[in-house]
Image (cartoon, rainbow, N blue to C red):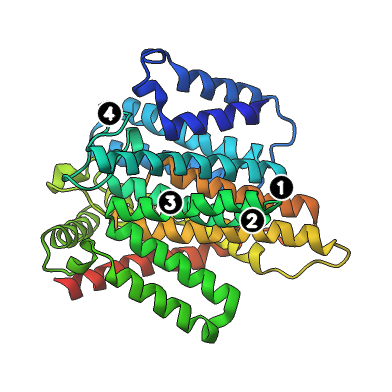
């Protein structure tokens, strides 16, 4: 029952009918659904909380608090916790409740259908200038939605996450009409990405296509489809033809990254404080990684990037692992296929978030939770499948932390 409430909560998180349907306005639908899911989850027996992310999420929260203490903004701690704790708890709910293949497919179906709904809304919005939700076009041409999707770039990221899920659902659907249904959804979503006119979204989809092609056909055989895909992307009328460091919005992003690096230099341990980036620079960071190390310092950034990197590593490992001795190949392959879907979805999100300040976004924590959930399901089903230990990877994770900062620094040096 907790899982049903959780799926309903995710549906409301995406579709947000409570914000434009008169019958639901003023009704605390989302808090009730969330608390009901959380309350029922507490009585769930098999929570599978032995993944390293179980400790990393509280560590991220601690880092946020310490960053604000170091900044002297104690009054900001309660609203920060009120805003972020539901995101942190969402991770635990998804990671623990999505504990079977059937539930993973159901979760993917909900995300896919909600994303297609948002794309259809965007298509209608692009024709009328305003969607049935009341959301208006951004900059006169770019589609948007409500809530966490009121920015076209955020909307594009949601579509990017759902793309590999739609393709998986299409391949696993039974019958011609089932495959046709999910194929139509995939086409709708691709058109939705185009209508967002998000360069980050298009680049993220291109990265996903590249990874999918190499994984399916190999490096050599992928040359032609990747070349065709790049050529088609270049021919589309979009903001991609202005993607250079001299174009106004791109230049503003690079300047924000530069300021974020200086924030880290001046406040290396705990950063400038959660939510205080724009107290030190007029624009948003436009980079999830820059925002993390600028606001949380080396202390908090280590936990954040470890949380993300271990989640990606889990599904990458699971998608490539050989079938264990004694395991049924079809069952093992079914788990591997879902792990690969999440791996490609995560790569798309992390590519797009290089240009967006989405460090604390619920979609990121939800996707990391799904990565952990499929990995834990495989370990639960086949105990000999090796676990991922945080302690054994502290040094590589610290190297990743410093390496990512150096990479961003060099990128800024080149672009400036």
CB atoms of marks 1 and 2 within 8 Å? yes
Q: Kindly identify which residue carries mark 2.
A: 338
* Badge 3: residue crowd in 10 Å (few <14, some 14–19, many ≥20): many
Q: Nearer the viewer, mark 2 or mark 3?
A: 3
Q: Nearer the viewer, mark 3 or mark 1?
A: 3
Closer to the chain start, of discs 4 and 3, is 4
Quarter of the figure that contains the N terminus = top right
Q: Is residue 259 above or below residue 212?
A: above
Quarter of the figure that contains the C terminus = bottom left
Q: Nearer the viewer, mark 4 or mark 1?
A: 4
Marks 4 and 2 sit apart, C-alpha to C-alpha, by 36 Å
Marks 4 and 3 sit apart, C-alpha to C-alpha, by 21 Å
Closer to the chain start, of discs 4 and 1, is 1
- Rendered residue at 41%/25% (across/down): 17
CB atoms of marks 2 and 3 within 8 Å? no
- Rendered residue at 85%/61% (across/down): 328
Q: Kindly identify which residue carries mark 4.
A: 134
Say which quarter of the image contains residue 126.
top left
Element assignment for label 3: helix
Closer to the chain start, of discs 4 and 2, is 4
Residue 304 shows in the view = no
**Residue 337 in picture, x, y percent from top left:** 66, 60
What label sits on residue 189 in the rendered view? 3
* Badge 1: residue crowd in 10 Å (few <14, some 14–19, many ≥20): some
Marks 1 and 2 sit apart, C-alpha to C-alpha, by 8 Å
* Badge 4: residue crowd in 10 Å (few <14, some 14–19, many ≥20): few
Closer to the chain start, of discs 2 and 3, is 3
Q: Kindly identify which residue carries mark 1.
A: 101
């Amino acid at each position: 029952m907790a899982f049903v409430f959780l799926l309903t909560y995710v549906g409301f998180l995406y579709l947000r009918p409570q914000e434009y349907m008169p019958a639901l306005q003023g009704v605390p639908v989302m808090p009730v659904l969330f608390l009901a899911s959380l309350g029922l989850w507490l009585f769930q027996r098999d929570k599978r909380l032995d993944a390293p992310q179980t400790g990393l999420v509280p560590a991220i929260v601690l880092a946020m608090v310490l960053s604000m203490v170091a900044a002297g903004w104690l009054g900001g701690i309660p609203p920060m916790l009120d805003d972020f704790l539901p995101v942190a708890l969402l991770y635990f709910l998804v990671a623990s409740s999505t504990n079977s293949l059937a539930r993973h497919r159901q979760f993917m179906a909900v995300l896919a259908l909600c994303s297609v709904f948002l794309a259809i809304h965007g298509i209608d919005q692009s024709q009328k200038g305003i969607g049935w939700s009341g959301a208006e076009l951004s900059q006169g041409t770019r589609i948007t939605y409500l809530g966490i999707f009121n920015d076209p770039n955020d909307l594009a990221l949601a579509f990017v996450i759902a793309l590999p899920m739609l393709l998986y659902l299409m391949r696993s659907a039974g019958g011609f009409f089932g495959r046709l249904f999910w194929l139509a959804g995939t086409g709708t979503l691709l058109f939705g990405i185009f209508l967002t006119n998000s360069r980050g979204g298009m680049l993220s989809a291109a990265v996903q296509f590249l990874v999918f092609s190499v994984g399916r056909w190999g490096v050599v055989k992928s040359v032609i489809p990747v070349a065709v895909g790049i050529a088609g992307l270049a021919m589309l009328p979009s903001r991609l033809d202005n993607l250079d460091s001299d174009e106004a919005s791109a230049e503003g992003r690079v300047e924000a990254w530069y300021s974020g690096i200086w924030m880290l230099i001046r406040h290396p341990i705990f950063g400038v404080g959660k939510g205080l980036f724009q107290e030190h620079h007029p624009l948003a960071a436009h980079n999830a990684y820059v925002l993390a190390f600028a606001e949380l310092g080396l202390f908090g950034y280590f936990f954040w990037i470890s949380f993300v990197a271990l989640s990606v590593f889990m599904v990458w490992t699971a998608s490539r692992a050989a079938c264990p001795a004694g395991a049924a190949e079809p069952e093992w392959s079914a788990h591997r296929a879902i792990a690969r879907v999440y791996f490609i979805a995560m790569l798309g999100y992390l590519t797009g978030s290089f240009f967006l300040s989405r460090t604390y976004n619920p979609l990121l924590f939800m996707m990391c939770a799904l990565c952990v959930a499929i990995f834990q399901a495989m370990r639960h089903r086949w105990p000999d499948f090796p676990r991922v230990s945080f302690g054994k990877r502290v040094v590589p994770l610290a190297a990743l932390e410093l390496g990512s900062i150096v990479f961003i620094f060099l990128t800024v040096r080149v672009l400036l």
